[in-house]
Image: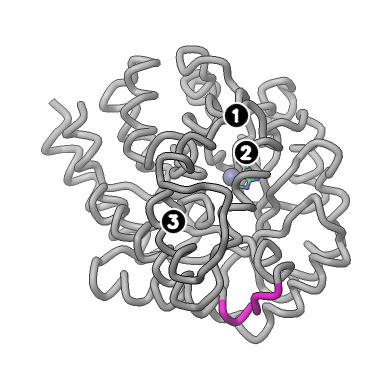
């Protein structure tokens, strides 16, 4: 099964680039930039990665991101992640980045976007991994602040495909960002959002009805509401599920209790993703491996999940068909 998963062509649709920041690289970049961090070694950073809810995690995650200063730092961070994609047969990835995490510290939008997008271009040429960018607004900040970010992004609109919404969910409902999402859509960005990770089903309703999102990040708590489930199916909207993130943040107590299989049986379109792989114990393939074991998923289930990852990617039809064909050939040759 491990070999099947390793070679399975797949896409990753839910990945925060700041969450791919491995301790060793964080340590190296902190030293390079002469930034004091409260850890004396890579091991100390690793030890600090202990959290049992979204907020505890976010506190550490924002602190880690604060050593990123130059365009080269963003380039190195992104290229490292894309190399891991190539090693896992992740053929395509949709990378979220949080501009406000950096602009709040005085780093320019330009520095962030140029470093990330240059790495994406190089990786496509050198590694054959395609990617696109999702600019994510931080929901613990104001809508006004998100508007500033939208404004800063406009010179780089050609480099950004979609907008997202992340950070502390409870108390920050999607409706808080209605106007900035409307404005983002007018600029041509596709609307996406985290919803139903810690927030209840009504947050998912708001994300669908008010923000008009085209894909739901996490969406676990949609299962609280059968009418919502049917609505998600009717609108043909996929969920980007992140199993190891869910257990790390105690959204799900144990992988054996994870609702992924139930979601599939209900007819929801589910994909498997890593979210913040440096923090949650594994890259996307590790998520496939551990959830397969916990829920006893078949090769057909895994094929279905990988198929969804291409089907619901924000790529053009021709590229989508190319990847689906590659997946189908692989499956036909390896399903028995
Ligand atoms: N949830 C919300 N915000 C985030 C996450 C997450 O899992 N990762 C990075 N920002
Ligand atoms: Zn996320």
Alpha-carbon span between mark 1 and mark 3: 24 Å
Q: Quadrant of the C terminus?
A: top left
Distance from mark 1 CB to nearest ligand 1 atom below 8 Å? yes
Mark earlier in primary sequence (2, 3): 3
Q: How crowded is mark 1: few (under 14 residues within 10 Å), some or many (20 or more)?
A: many
Residue in front for this viewpoint, 302 or 87: 87
Nearest-to-viewer mark from 1 and 3: 3
Please count the marks in the image: 3
Residue in the picture at 66% in, 56% down: 164
Residue 311 in view in this figure: no
Q: Residues within 10 Å of mark 3 (few under 14, many from 20)?
A: many
Residue in front for this viewpoint, 104 or 35: 35
Residue 31 in the image: state x and y as whole percent.
Answer: 45, 64
On the rendering, which quadrant does ligand 2 occupy? top right
**Disc 1 designates what residue?**
249
Q: Quadrant of the N terminus?
A: top left
**Disc 2 + disc 1, Cβ < 8 Å:** yes
Answer with left or right where residue 177 lies relative to residue 303.
Answer: right
**Disc 2 designates what residue?**
57
Residue in the picture at 52% in, 66% down: 133
**Disc 3 designates what residue?**
27
Image quadrant assignment for residue 236: top right
Alpha-carbon span between mark 2 and mark 1: 8 Å
Residue in the picture at 40% in, 61% down: 28
Residue 109 lies in the magenta-colored region: yes
């Amino acid at each position: 099964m491990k070999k099947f998963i390793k070679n399975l062509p797949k896409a990753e649709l839910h990945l925060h680039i700041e969450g791919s920041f491995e301790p060793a690289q964080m340590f190296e970049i902190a030293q390079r930039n002469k930034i004091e961090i409260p850890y004396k070694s890579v091991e100390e950073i690793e030890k600090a990665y202990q959290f049992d809810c979204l907020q505890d995690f976010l506190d550490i995650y924002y602190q880690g991101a604060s050593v990123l200063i130059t365009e080269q730092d963003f380039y190195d961070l992104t290229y490292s992640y894309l190399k891991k994609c190539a090693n896992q047969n992740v053929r395509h990835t949709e990378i979220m980045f949080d501009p406000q995490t950096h602009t709040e510290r005085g780093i320019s939008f330009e520095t962030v976007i140029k470093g990330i997008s240059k790495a994406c271009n190089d990786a496509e040429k050198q590694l054959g991994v395609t990617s696109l960018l999702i600019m994510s607004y931080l929901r613990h900040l104001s809508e006004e602040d998100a508007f500033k970010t939208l404004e800063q992004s406009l010179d780089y609109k050609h480099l950004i495909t979609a907008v997202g919404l992340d950070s502390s969910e409870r108390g920050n409902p999607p409706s808080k960002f209605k106007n900035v999402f409307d404005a983002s859509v007018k600029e041509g960005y596709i609307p996406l959002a985290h919803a139903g990770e810690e927030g209840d089903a009504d947050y998912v309703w708001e994300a669908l009805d008010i923000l008009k999102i085209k894909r739901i990040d996490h969406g676990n708590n949609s299962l609280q509401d059968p009418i919502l489930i049917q609505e998600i199916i009717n609108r043909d909207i996929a969920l980007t599920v992140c199993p190891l993130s869910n257990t790390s943040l105690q959204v799900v107590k144990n992988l054996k209790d994870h609702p992924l299989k139930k979601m599939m049986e209900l007819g929801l379109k589910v994909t498997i993703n890593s979210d913040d792989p440096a923090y949650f114990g594994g890259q996307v393939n590790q998520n496939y491996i551990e959830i397969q074991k916990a829920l006893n998923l078949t090769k057909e289930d895994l094929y279905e999940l990988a198929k969804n990852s291409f089907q619901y990617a924000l790529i053009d039809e021709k590229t989508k068909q190319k990847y689906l064909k590659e997946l189908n050939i692989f499956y036909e040759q390896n399903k028995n």
